[in-house]
Amino acid sequence: MRILTALVLMSVQLSCTSEPDPDTRSTCVPAQFKDGAVLVLTTNYETSSLDMIHPNCPDEVRQNLVVASGDAVLRKWGNRPVVVNRGTESNLMVLDENLNVVSQIGLDSCGPHDIVELDEDNLLVSCYESTTIQKVSLSEERSEPWLELADYSGSDGFPEMDALAIDENYLYVTLQNLDRRDNWTPEKTGTILVFERDDLVLHREITLPCNNPYTALTFVDATTMWVGCAGTWGGDYSDAGIISLNLNDWSLTTLYDGEVLNGRPTSLDTGFSTQPLAVSATPSPGNMWDVDTMQLLRLDNGDVDILYTESGFSLGGIKSWSDSKILIAQRTYDSQSGVLLLNIDTLEVENRWATGLLPSHFIISD
């Protein structure tokens, strides 16, 4: 769904438009991503670039290492960073350990949203502007149609496939089921399609108790997945929430609804199961297209604690660095903008890294 990006485009002052030049002055931040680094996608929504930090290097940022499209996300293929250029750019940029672009693979008429690793040479791509999941071969640097989902399209001709996940038995695909001709409103609740990994036979179609599974699809453990639903954009967020899927009996449980989350979830981190975390956005009471506040939440067996909050459309992705420390992408136009390292026990911001453009989200090397 492009609504969140469009809202930011309307509100962002495009002041960070200088041409990126790689910053090689760093001496503490690792030269290679594999050496425990954090890769940050930064953007001004016209262009994006990659910065690299390390939480043990509090004063250093390697800025503007790779330039990408304004609508891009970061993913990993094994331990290789991959830039997914969405929208009309529609390609994958595969990086090596030194963050050089070793391959740029076009995805015709795809509009890629997510990737999963099928094996060490092949990955799968969900295509938002198509009805077909594509398979990409790294060694051959080409893509091909792999799984057709036209039967699940809505009245606009698209199923709005989004997040992907895979395990040893199944491939999981979320469908947003939106009507792009009617302000991206849901035509029906969200869906998870579960396919047999080996023969692509549909194993199960799961109807979610929430709208627009935009936020996340992630394994919590070997038998549980969480999916985050952003709901219908507007003042009412009762159709948003975080849902648990039991992979043994395929049952669904609403863990946290929109009211409990004080808005719609926009980011989710389950890196440390004792303290799963989320970011939620509370719509503005005066303008349903605007955001009043965003908050970092600790999710604890049905209870929700607000750990950190900012006004406006201010918080991007989050990523656990340790059991008590979380990285936060804060995209505000003040001295607090950048990547924050928050101690969730003391609620103190222990460090801030000033990024070249506004930080969006992260990946961390294995």
Image (cartoon, rainbow, N blue to C red):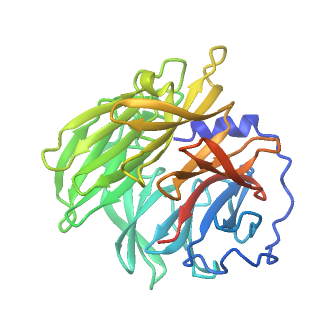
Q: Nearer the viewer, residue 30 or 7?
A: 30
Q: Nearer the viewer, residue 39 or 174?
A: 39
Q: Vertical placement of 120 versus 344: above or below? A: below
Q: Where residue 48 sits in the image (x, y, percent)? A: 70, 59
Please report the residue visible at 82 percent of the width from the left and 71 percent of the height from the top: 21
Which residue is outermost to the top? 286
274 with respect to 54 (left or right)? left
Between 73 and 266, the one nearer to me in the picture: 266
Residue 326 visible from this viewpoint = yes
Count of picture labels = 0
The x, y position of residue 9, in whole percent, is 71, 40
Q: Tell me residue 356's x, y (percent).
A: 78, 59
Q: Residue furthest bottom?
A: 139
Residue 34 lies in what quarter of the image?
bottom right
Quadrant in which residue 140 is drawn: bottom left
Quarter of the image holding residue 88?
bottom right
Q: Is residue 73 visible?
A: no
Examine the rendered structure and indicate whether residue 19 appears above or below residue 296: below
Q: Give the residue drawn at x 22%, y 65%.
A: 197
Judge from the rendering whether residue 167 lies leftward or rightward of residue 237; answer left or right: left
- Which residue: 42% across, 55% down? 271
Picture coordinates of residue 345, whole percent (x, y) = 53, 44
Residue sitting farthest toward the front: 346
Identify whether 199 is placed above or below 317. Answer: below
- Give the answer, above or below, for where 65 lies relative to 166: below
In-image side of 200 versus 186 (left or right): left
